[in-house]
Image (spheres, rainbow, N blue to C red):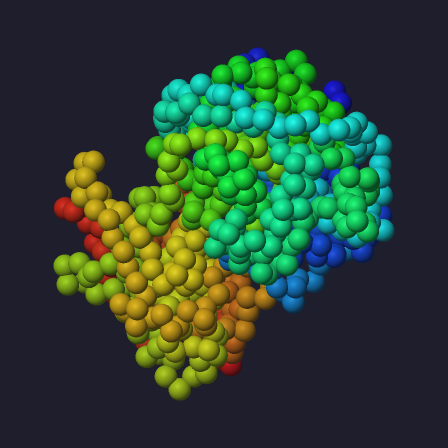
Amino acid sequence: MDQRSTRTIILNNGTVEDKRREIRDYFHQSFSLDEKLYDLLDCDAAFYLRAEPLRHPLIFYFGHTASFYINKLIVAGIISTRINPFFESMFAIGVDEMSWDDLNAEHYDWPTVAAVKAYREQVRKRVDEVIESLPLTLPIDAESPFWAIMMGIEHSRIHIETSSVIIRRLPLEMVRQLPLWEICSETGTAPQNELLPVRGGKVTLGKTKDHPLYGWDNEYGRHSFTVDDFAASQYLVSNHEFREFIEAGGYTQPGFWSEEGKSWLAFSRAERPLFWLKDGSNYRLRTLAQVINMPWDWPVEVNQLEAKAFCNWKAQSSRLPIRLPTEDEWRRMYDLHEIPDQPWWENAPGNINLEYWASPCPVNRFPFGKFYDLIGNVWQWTETSISGFAGFEVHPWYDDFSTPTFDTQHNLIKGGSWISTGNEATRDARYAFRRHFFQHAGFRYVATEQELEIADAMYETDAAVAQYCDAHFGPDKFGVKNFQAQLVSLSMAAMRGKPKERALDLGCAVGRASFELARHFESVTGIDFSARFIRIAHQLQLKGNIHYQLPEEGDIVSVHEQQLDSFGLSETSPKIEFVQGDAHNLKPQFKGYDLVIAANLIDRLSDPAHFLTSISERINPGGLLVIASPYTWLEEFTKKKNWIGAVRRAGEPFTSFEGLQELLSSHFHLLGEPQDLPFVIRETARKFQHTVSQVSIWEKFE
């Protein structure tokens, strides 16, 4: 099969042997296509240039798509040993969309391209072995081990697209045009755009759990909405049509821009679309690896802020209620045209899935009834900020895929682009970016009187996250004082007379202990494995408040808001860095701490002994390690063979605290006796968990 036009796998048909072979082929095709994209780079230096200031250099993504497989296979419990712990930490997190990305170049000593290529070959071989040996039953669903394999494949296909956007921003002398990435040669006079009627009706979005294709967590659940009759532009907005906006002073008239758009304009000083190059009085276009004469009939590629400003200008000049479509309106147009879904189409019905060119093409090239480019060519920006459908559930193997974008700051793009493959090219794909980000994205406009739903403050509805918000910042319960504040108080009593430069809060959850520590330390690092928790901590740091809802009884919920000011903690925010990370495999820069707190962490680690025997490397001589744990060992988190205690040895009880003593004694000595510290987790208005954590404080040898 042509490597550029592969299709995502149907997960509920065929024999086990055929499905294993299909997935193996899809894996290798995807892995190779990812590498062939980087063949466009003409020199190793191109891997290290940060062409997009909001993203890492390309060497990160070259390693990231490989290390992702290993990290997710470990999280899923499918493998237990790493290939290269250093790479699998360096390339793990910090991708594009999370506000807590670590983009500080001083923290990275990037490896050579040759070293990453060698690592990729090791990963390819290891994943191939897993595919060949992993037990397989059909259908494959979100709980199947093979879901982790599909997750890695589809993740790599996302990065083929996002990395291509970065390559498009590299200096031209650092890239080369290759036959595999040949661009469209068709261009002509841009068609006159016009509004055509679209019949309204009910749309229903969201996959069921037995859907035959792989999906990301935000695709599941259910959403129904009745769309009014509206009109939509026949074509995507072309370069020619967008030039009218520029010539009308669109970039210089603040009235067309949202407040966010005006801020972006002031920062970026943009005067035209990013990929337009001024050539005297004319324009040229930067494609993936070359600059060409402006194809005026191709779709314009802009960010959402530019697209929205154009619509505001168009509304004023036409005196029509013009705006971007919503996700529901885009889907209504899709449904009315009965477009076959990938992978069931015979040939791609639009410029998508790399089945035609490695570039956009004329906006009047692919018809769908009277409309054009309902899918493909370029992504289409919408008015809709992404959130989960009713019934949304985070997938535990990748909890930072969707939830960081549920902040009202990320808008959906729909329809896919010329380079959208795999899951990206399916009907139910839901991808969102910050409104100032660039993808291979353009837009069409609609005219409608139907009011938009305005995205407002997000109330956290994830039950586990909301419980922790309440436990960290909610009222005391049954006279039990706040656990995090009490733990920091105990720690500071033990720190009396010691340096207080840097502290590390491992397993920080939503951050209360980190904020409390920042009262006393010059800098604090809060690290948690869960992006869902770190997102809340970071929101508190930026905005000073959080919103969440708690179940009262049955379907009745209550809504809550907490503010840092209420606890006298708002002034501590600048001292804190919140990071998503794995306590087993922290990045090298997380060291040199005077205090490390690991609160209710060790009995949730897959290998607590590894953590305990290596944590001394992060602590200064004379520094303290504070461990709090109720020792609630569960095989769901820690295989029994890895428990550090709570077992019998030679027929006698061997406690978790004795395990701590055994593992820490070569680097630490115990300060005083362990203390019990209770905490209470609210489940409903009348159901609470009361737990007692044992706190032990250990001083590292001088």
Residue 619 in percent (x, y) is at 51, 72
Q: Picture quarter containing residue 4?
A: top right
Say above or below: 404 vs 663: above
- Name the one closer to the observer, 611 or 424: 424
- Name the one closer to the observer, 597 or 648: 597
Q: Is residue 388 left or right of residue 268?
A: left
Picture residue at 27% right of the left edge, 63% below the top: 483
Say above or below: 384 vs 532: above
Residue 179 in percent (x, y) is at 85, 32
Say above or below: 123 vs 174: above
- Name the one closer to the observer, 687 or 436: 436
Q: Quadrant of the N terminus?
A: top right
Say above or below: 515 vs 312: below
Q: Is residue 464 left or right of residue 247?
A: left
Picture residue at 56% right of the left edge, 17% below the top: 339
Residue 437 in view: no
Residue 696 in percent (x, y) is at 35, 68
Picture residue at 48% right of the left edge, 65% below the top: 577
